[in-house]
Image (spheres, helix red, strand yellow):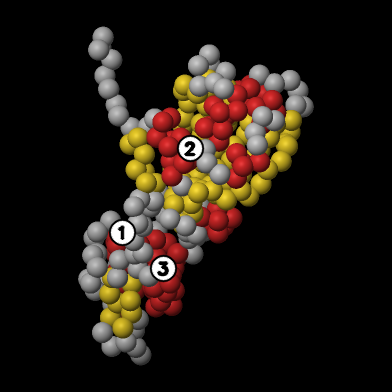
């Protein structure tokens, strides 16, 4: 009688620990692990990846799972599979002239002039409790919501939802929504100067609708940025929620110490 070789418990535990959830398909998790190894430089262009058999042994998954994971990387042009030779890293589609932003309003507004936008939605919507608190609105007041996709060298890199009080939005011309910077338009139409923006940033992942619009894979890392833009006297004139592709956009923040500390 033939016997089946059993994987030692300690090795099985090590393999299992590489995957974060049993609710996410293993091929997707394996593809993500290999993708991060390539993008981080652990494997460089021209390097050969482990064989299918080695990946099966290393990660404790089936050959079908390995092939599905490699297929996703091949579709993204990260690898090239050659019959009889193996799988080789080809890199990834280079992003020409990635965007590096300083944490200033001037940079943000200048970017609006240097990149193009596609208007996806423009309509009046009911204000939320957060809108009412931010803009000091009464109950059930309407505000204007503008959804745009911003492009860099014809590649979408940010999905932007602007929420603006009605009295501000009513001063806009049609072209203000379809091109340039919303903040520049506010300054121009209302003849005022925007001074500060309160901003919060967090990491998130692309869901299916965002992945489709930003042309990334589902689960790709994004930067989620919330801003409240204010005038010289502290009046809030826009709430902006933006999702940025992290492979194109980066934000630099300068930290200083309080001279009194």
State the SS at label 2. Answer: strand
> In front here: 254 or 232?
232
- The residue identified by callout 3 is 76
What's the residue at 35%, 68% (across, down)? 78
> In front here: 185 or 134?
185
Q: Residue 188: where, in percent of width, then height?
A: 56, 28
Precedes in sequence: disc 1 or disc 2: 1
Q: Residue 219: where, in percent of width, then height?
A: 48, 55
Spatial CA span between label 1 and label 2: 24 Å
What's the residue at 74%, 20% (across, down)? 138
Give the class, few, some or many, for how many residues have Cα within 10 Å of label 3's Cα (few <14, many ≥20). some
Tell me the tag on residue 225: 2
**Is any atom of residue 6 visible in this view?**
no
- Quadrant that contains the C terminus: top left
Position of residue 37 in the picture relative to residue 184 (left or right): left
- Quadrant that contains the N terminus: bottom left
Relative to 94, residue 121 above or below = above
**Is any atom of residue 210 visible in this view?**
yes
Spatial CA span between label 3 and label 1: 12 Å
Which residue appears farthest toward the right when viewing the image? 140
State the SS at label 1. Answer: helix
Which residue appears farthest toward the top when viewing the image? 260
Q: Residue 176: where, in percent of width, then height?
A: 60, 39
- The residue identified by callout 1 is 39
Give the class, few, some or many, for how many residues have Cα within 10 Å of label 1's Cα (few <14, many ≥20). few
How many numbered discs, if any?
Answer: 3
Q: Residue 218: where, in percent of width, then height?
A: 50, 58
Precedes in sequence: disc 2 or disc 3: 3
Precedes in sequence: disc 3 or disc 1: 1
What's the residue at 70%, 30% (across, down)? 170
């Amino acid at each position: 009688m033939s016997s089946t070789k059993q994987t030692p418990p300690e090795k099985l535990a090590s393999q299992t620990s590489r995957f974060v959830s049993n609710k996410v398909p293993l091929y997707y998790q394996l593809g993500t692990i290999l993708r991060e190894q390539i993008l981080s430089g652990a494997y460089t262009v021209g390097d050969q990846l482990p064989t299918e058999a080695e990946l099966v042994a290393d990660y404790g998954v089936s050959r079908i799972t390995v092939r599905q994971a490699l297929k996703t990387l091949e579709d993204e042009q990260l690898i090239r599979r050659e019959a009889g030779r193996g799988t080789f890293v080809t890199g990834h589609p280079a992003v020409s002239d990635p965007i590096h932003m300083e944490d200033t309003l001037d940079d943000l507004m200048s970017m609006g002039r240097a990149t193009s936008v596609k208007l996806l939605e423009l309509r009046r919507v009911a204000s939320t409790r957060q809108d009412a608190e931010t803009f000091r609105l009464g109950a059930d007041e309407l505000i204007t919501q503008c959804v745009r996709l911003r492009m860099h060298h014809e590649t979408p890199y940010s999905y932007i939802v602007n929420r603006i009080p009605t009295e501000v939005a009513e001063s806009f011309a049609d072209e203000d929504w379809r091109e340039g910077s919303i903040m520049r338009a506010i300054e121009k139409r209302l003849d005022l100067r925007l001074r500060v923006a309160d901003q919060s940033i967090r990491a998130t992942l692309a869901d299916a609708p965002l992945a489709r619009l930003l042309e990334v894979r589902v689960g790709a890392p994004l930067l989620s940025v919330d801003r409240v833009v204010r005038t010289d006297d502290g009046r809030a004139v826009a709430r902006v929620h933006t999702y940025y592709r992290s492979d194109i956009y980066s934000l630099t923040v300068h930290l200083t110490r309080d001279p009194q500390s």
